[in-house]
Amino acid sequence: MIEAKTSPDHGQHIADQPPRVVLVHGQRECDVVIQRRDDVVAHVVGSFVALIGSQLLGIAVGRDILGIAPLVAMDDDTLARWLKPALTHYLTDPVP
């Protein structure tokens, strides 16, 4: 157990703490950083999936369900060329 007097929250410089306390304190901070990183990655990946999915779902609905004439008439290669810039943007541009 860590005593309050060795806690960095109570003003003791980390260099003055016993190594065991520094290790525990460092691990706790490391765990927080890792959790935050994982949260950010999950959010970003979720955003990519949602944006790309919405593009593809919109095309499918417009083409196959609503029967929007220009989408229905467009061959797959042309459609892919139109979609490529949007999908590339989601996958390669910096996250806002």
Image (cartoon, rainbow, N blue to C red):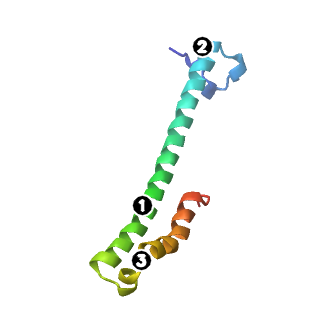
Marks 1 and 2 in Cβ contact (< 8 Å): no
Q: Is mark 1 on a helix, strand or loop?
A: helix
Of badges 2 and 3, nearer the viewer stands: 3
Residue 47 in the image: above or below residue 55: above
Marks 3 and 1 in Cβ contact (< 8 Å): no
52 sits to left or right of 15: left
For marks 3 and 1, the one nearer the N-term is 1
Q: Residue at x 54, y 36 (%)?
A: 34
Q: Judge whether residue 3 can be spotted in this image.
A: yes
Q: Is mark 3 on a helix, strand or loop?
A: loop
Query: Which label belongs to residue 75?
Result: 3
Tell me which amino acid carries mark 1.
Ala
For marks 2 and 3, the one nearer the N-term is 2
Query: Which label belongs to residue 20?
Result: 2
The residue that label 1 is drawn on is 50
66 sits to left or right of 59: left
Q: Which residue is drawn at 63% across and 25% down?
A: 8
Q: Nearer the viewer, residue 81 or 12?
A: 81
Q: Is mark 2 on a helix, strand or loop?
A: helix
For marks 1 and 2, the one nearer the N-term is 2
Query: Which label belongs to residue 81?
Result: none
Q: Judge whether residue 6 can be spotted in this image.
A: no
Could you say which quadrant of the image residue 60 lies in? bottom left
Classed neighbour count for the residue bearing mark 2: other residues with Cα under 10 Å, few (<14), some (14–19), many (≥20):
few
